Image: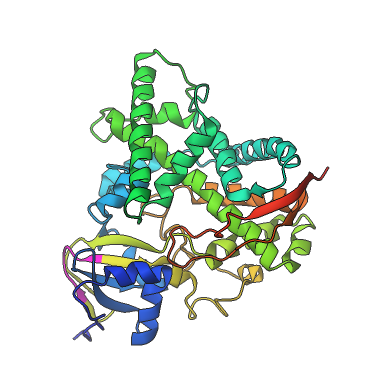
Amino acid sequence: MAFREELPYDEGLDNTLAFFNEGYLYITNRRKRFNRDMFKTRILGGKQVICMAGKEAAEAFYDNDKFKRHGAAPNKVLNTLFGQDGVQTLDGEEHAHRKSLFMNFMTKESLEEIGDLVEDEWMKSLNEWAKQNNIVLYEEVKQILTIAISKWVGVPLDEVDIESFSKELGNMYESAEKIGMKHFKGKHARNKNEKWLEKLIGKIRSGEVTVDEERPFYKIAFHKDLEGELLATHTAAVEVLNLLRPTVAISVYIVLSALALHEFPKEVDELRNGDKTYNKMFVQEVRRYYPFFPVAPAIVKNDFFWGGHDFKKGTLVLLDLYGTNHHPELWENPNDFSPERFTSWDKSPFDLIPQGGGDYLTGHRCAGEWLTIAVMQRALDLLVNKMSYDVAEQDLSLSMKEMPSVPKSGFIIQNVQKVE
């Protein structure tokens, strides 16, 4: 007979306030207190939730027979971050079919192209940065990525104000867990840009607007579902934003890369020798070490037994992404920044999970993870080898309850020069 054990319970009628006050560390703090990788709590209006972390937990969490995603994300997250009816909310054959659309964009050639586009825009910006006293790197990189990914996707920018557009795309991922005006800004930005893209998609389908048929924008506009029907224009607009918005969010990782170069200056010499292997190891360590997504939600599909506990159909489960990336049983000295740890990493799909785990094609691992790594590697090379700069006196602290977490100052640089 299988061993069953009652899970520890974080007392309280509703621990939502504690969840947001402790942010990335909420689950980790209780795992340490209970000395368990799994416990129960109540959040989001007193809803019973199971929280878990670790490699084995990730393997279970990304088992499509055990969990589903539809209905897992709160509406406020859908209204800002993911959008309604996007690929992240689908399950089964419908999810696999839609996911294949995105994975087909991630070819070696297309990843090289997005890197080239980022570098082109970055080098143009360097000329302007050299004329200015203070550069807020986070805001500047958001604009660079907005232009680069729009060109890559095939979204026309003729009448777009790039500064405003980049801020709106930023608002979508910066406001997911916020309340009040900050949440309103994210919701407004999504509504505005969904309507704009819906109109464009309608014009593309009617032939009134012509876009490159090899670009993702065209392919999404004419993508057909399992029944052979074109996606609703709103759904197609959501999926276009599911390429634009996450790519602009890579600005968070790029600024964290700059922070890592500043906090761990010995790494610069290793990176300046042009070793692409070390460049990627550094990028992977940035993704592991710094906070990005705190948790991933899913709902129990059918009753099952795992880890000494009965999971009941309909239960909300949160996988601790940040905690798994810092789990002491998975990572030696997890609170040390050490790119060298990836020299012997076995590339497990369930221990390094900043953008989800499991299989790309059939599971819910982020379709844009390869693109993220490609853009980060190119940006890291630019920071180390194509420019010089000074880091201004500023507040570089990271909040463990702001999601995503970037240096409070946005990372201000001065005396920027292009290195030929």
Q: Is residue 173 visible?
A: yes
Residue under the point 28% across and 47% down: 90
Q: Which residues are magenta?
A: 310-316
Residue 384 image position (x, y, % from top left): 74, 54
Magenta stretch encompasses residue 313: yes
Residue 82 image position (x, y, % from top left): 35, 46
Does 420 sit left or right of 249 as displayed?
A: right
Residue under the point 48% across and 69% down: 325
Q: Toward the viewer: 46 or 374?
A: 46
Question: How many badges with numbers are in the image?
Answer: 0
Which residue is the extreme one toward the top? 208
Residue under the point 36% across and 86% down: 33
> With respect to residue 102, does 319 lie above or below?
below
Give residue 346's quadrant in the image: bottom right
Magenta stretch encompasses residue 142: no
Q: Toward the viewer: 336 or 224?
A: 336
Give residue 238's quadrant in the image: top left
Quarter of the image where the N terminus is located:
bottom left
Residue under the point 23% across and 86% down: 3
Quarter of the image where the C terminus is located:
top right
Residue 354 image position (x, y, % from top left): 47, 61
> With respect to residue 39, does 164 lie above or below?
above
Residue 281 image position (x, y, % from top left): 64, 62
> Which colour style is shown?
rainbow
Does 175 sit left or right of 234 as displayed?
A: right
Q: Is residue 306 visible?
A: no
